[in-house]
Image: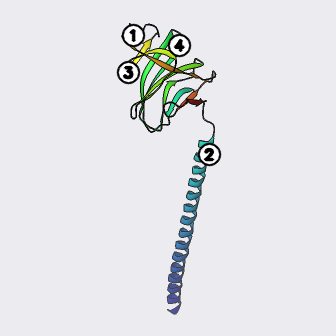
Amino acid sequence: MSTIAASSSSVEFLTASSQKAATGFWKKTMQKLARARSRRRAVLGLCLGASALLPLPASADLRLCNQTASKVGVTLGYRDAQGWVTEGWWDLKPRNCETLLKGSLAAQFYYLYAVDYSRGGEWSGRAMMCTRDTAFTIRGVEDCLARGFDRNGFIEVDTGQQRNWTIQLSDPGQPLAGGP
């Protein structure tokens, strides 16, 4: 009888010991899995972060960045296969950029006329082109007034025949800056 009790006691002892060992085993296994998951997340984060540093396919656009503290209205003039075109208006918030033309630039020279809506003033030049007060696309630069349009002086922007270009618009009276 004492043998049975001892056996029973041994079995209970083994069972408790096994449970304790099993609990320890599972606890360690779960900790290892959690560390492995954490490492995978860290590696994934590094990969995603590194991918942000890789060169992206070149985006060939004409962009304008409003570096002023004012809301600005912008019009653009350029020559395409059918002749002269003026387009407008793009409204740019302060310290914001906008793509004016998407795709590779087809010309070396583009022309810009802009108005400071908040403080008044304008960015204008000597190249006379047609505009109007509301959204527009106008073909041709001749006889603006006779055709019912306004006539404004545009600033010439030389892109140096780059495929893409960003114009930096600072306060009125300051020269435009730009670059690829």
In the picture, measured across the screen, residue 38 lies left or right of residue 73, that is: right
Label 3 near label 1: C-beta < 8 Å? no
Type of the residue with mark 2: Ala
The disc at residue 135 is 3
Q: What residue type is labelled 3?
A: Ala
At x 42% / y 10%, what residue is drawn? 144
Query: Mark 4 belongs to which amino acid?
Result: Asp
Q: Callout 1 environment at 10 Å: few (<14), some (14 to 19), or many (20+)?
A: few
Percent coordinates x, y for residue 14 in the rendering: 54, 80
Q: Is mark 3 on a helix, strand or loop?
A: loop
Tag 3 and tag 2, C-beta contact below 8 Å: no
| Residue at disc 1, secondary structure | loop
**Where on the picture, by quarter, is residue 90?**
top left
Please name the residue that numbered disc 2 is placed on. Answer: 50
- Tag 3 or tag 1, which sits nearer the N-term? 3
Q: Mark 1 points at which residue?
A: 145
